[in-house]
Amino acid sequence: MLIIFIDADGCPVKDEIYKVAERYQLKVFVVANKYINIPANERVEMVVASSGFDAADDWIVEQAGPGDIVVTADILLAERCVKRQVRALGPKGVEFTEDSIGSAVATRELMQNLRHMGEMRGGPAPMDKKDRSRFLGKLDEIIQSLKRR
């Protein structure tokens, strides 16, 4: 059974995921280090991971398996998921795959180093309508491909 796991701390597309999951009648685990309001829906479950570093990520990696989807902006979590053959999708609609995760991790490390050196400030651009649309399209595409299996 296809399950969607949301790395929910700071996830900007939770509402979109809830709507898509409702349409396909999919189970959703909303995983965070603290309680987050979720819709009153038997298929949506809140999981509060312990407060340890990466506890939410660890829970997701332990629970998700091939045929599931993890929505995360955390590239290192995405890498762990991809290694376990779990589909990993960023909130801007970029899917992390075996072919792309290596360069995503390298880019993350480069950007982190540039920020530490003071060469760069800030983070990624804020979400816009195109990002949300791209996310919804890609999520739908992944669900369709997994359902065809």
Image (cartoon, helix red, strand yellow):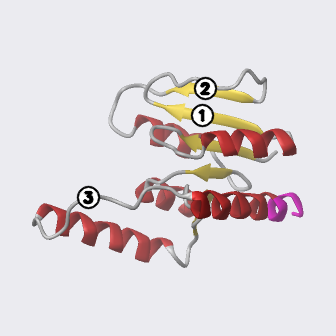
In front: label 2 or label 3: 3
Which residue is rendered at x = 67% and y = 60% of the image? 133
* The disc label shown at residue 46, or none: 2
Q: Residues within 10 Å of mark 1 (few under 14, many from 20)?
A: many
133 lies above or below 20: below
| Residue 32 among magenta residues | no
Q: Are marks 2 and 3 in contact (CB under 8 Å)?
A: no
Quadrant in the picture for the C terminus:
bottom right
- Residue 110 position within the rendered picture, expressed as x and y whole percent measured from the top left: 26, 72
43 lies above or below 138: above
Which residue is rendered at x = 18% and y = 69% of the image? 114
Residue 84 visible in image: no
* Residue 5 picture quarter: top right
Secondary structure found at label 2: strand
- Residue 70 position within the rendered picture, expressed as x and y whole percent measured from the top left: 61, 50
Q: Residues in magenta?
A: 144-149
* Residue 131 picture quarter: bottom right
- Residue 44 position within the rendered picture, expressed as x and y whole percent measured from the top left: 71, 29
* The disc label shown at residue 8, or none: none
Which residue is rendered at x = 70% and y = 57% of the image? 136
| Residue 147 among magenta residues | yes
Name the residue carrying label 3: 122
Q: Are marks 1 and 2 in contact (CB under 8 Å)?
A: yes
11 lies above or below 50: below
Inter-mark Cα distance, 3 to 1: 27 Å
Judge left or right: residue 78 versus residue 112: right
Secondary structure found at label 3: loop
- Residue 104 position within the rendered picture, expressed as x and y whole percent measured from the top left: 42, 71
